[in-house]
């Protein structure tokens, strides 16, 4: 079993609450818009970090993280794309990736809208953890955590970090 903390859209912001939850995870996954290399460095001090770059991320971050990250956690195939859309409204890049080989879990960020929905057509779970940072139009900062057990996702939790101001 692998405990995952799922973040997105930190926009250069990190605080002790995020770091506390990071310390409870086995791996941290960040779905883009880190905003600064300092966010990456803080997270990497705590646990292994996987992620993708977002549309606001600079060349240094883009050199460290891909646009599309496809990987396995235990036996679960994961696809992560910052601007990916959601079931029924995937971006062309996401549609291409899922058409070529559908993962069991598709993660996107960008919208700052927390979302968990099952895509029946492609037989996958879609997650968007919302935004853990303070930039953007969202009112409440959010992230998710869950457990990967072989190829199953268990104990999915939404974590509200409070208002963004």
Image (cartoon, rainbow, N blue to C red):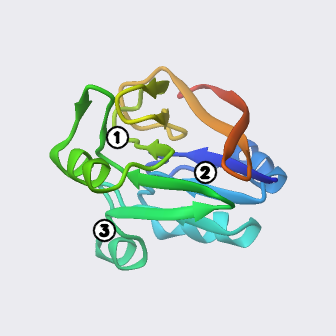
The residue tagged 2 is: 14
- Mark positioned earlier in the residue sequence (2 or 1): 2
Q: Which residue is mark 1?
A: 110
Circle nearer the viewer, 3 or 1? 1
Q: What residue is rendered at 60% in x and 51% in y?
A: 14
Task: Give the residue number, with chain letter if any, for mark 3.
Answer: 58
Mark 1: few/some/many CA within 10 Å (<14, 14-19, 20+):
many
Q: Measured along the vertical axis of the image, is residue 94 above or below residue 140?
A: below
Which residue is depicted at the point 40% across and 43% down?
108
Task: Name the image quarter holding residue 34.
Answer: bottom left
Q: As drawn, is 91 to the left or to the right of 161?
A: left
What percent of the width, then of the height, locates residue 116?
51, 26
User: In the image, is 146 to the left or to the right of 127?
Assistant: right
Q: Secondary structure at mark 2?
A: loop
Image x and y of residue 126, in percent: 46, 34
Q: Considering the numbered disc 3 on the image, is that residue within a helix, a strand or a loop?
A: loop
Do labels 2 and 1 touch, CB within 8 Å? no
Which of pointers 3 and 1 lies earlier in the amino acid sequence?
A: 3
**Distance in Å between CA atoms under marks 2 and 1:** 17 Å
Q: Residues within 10 Å of mark 2 (few under 14, many from 20)?
A: some
Label 3: few (<14), some (14–19) or many (≥20) C-alpha neighbours in 10 Å: some
Query: Who is closer to the viewer here, 118 or 135?
Result: 118
């Amino acid at each position: 079993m692998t405990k995952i903390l799922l973040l997105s859209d930190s926009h250069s912001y990190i605080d002790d609450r995020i770091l506390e939850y990071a310390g409870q995870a086995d791996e941290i996954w960040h779905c883009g818009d880190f905003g600064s290399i300092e966010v990456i460095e803080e997270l990497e001090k705590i646990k292994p970090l996987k992620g993708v770059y977002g549309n606001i991320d600079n060349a240094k971050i883009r050199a460290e993280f891909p646009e599309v990250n496809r990987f396995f956690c235990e036996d679960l195939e994961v696809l992560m794309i910052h601007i990916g859309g959601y079931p029924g409204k995937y971006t062309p890049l996401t549609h291409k990736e899922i058409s070529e080989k559908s993962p069991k879990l598709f993660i996107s960020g960008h919208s700052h809208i927390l979302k968990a929905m099952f895509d029946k057509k492609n037989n996958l779970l879609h997650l968007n953890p919302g935004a853990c940072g303070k930039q953007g139009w969202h009112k409440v900062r959010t992230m998710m955590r869950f457990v990967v057990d072989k190829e199953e996702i268990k104990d999915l939790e939404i974590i509200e970090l409070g208002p963004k101001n």
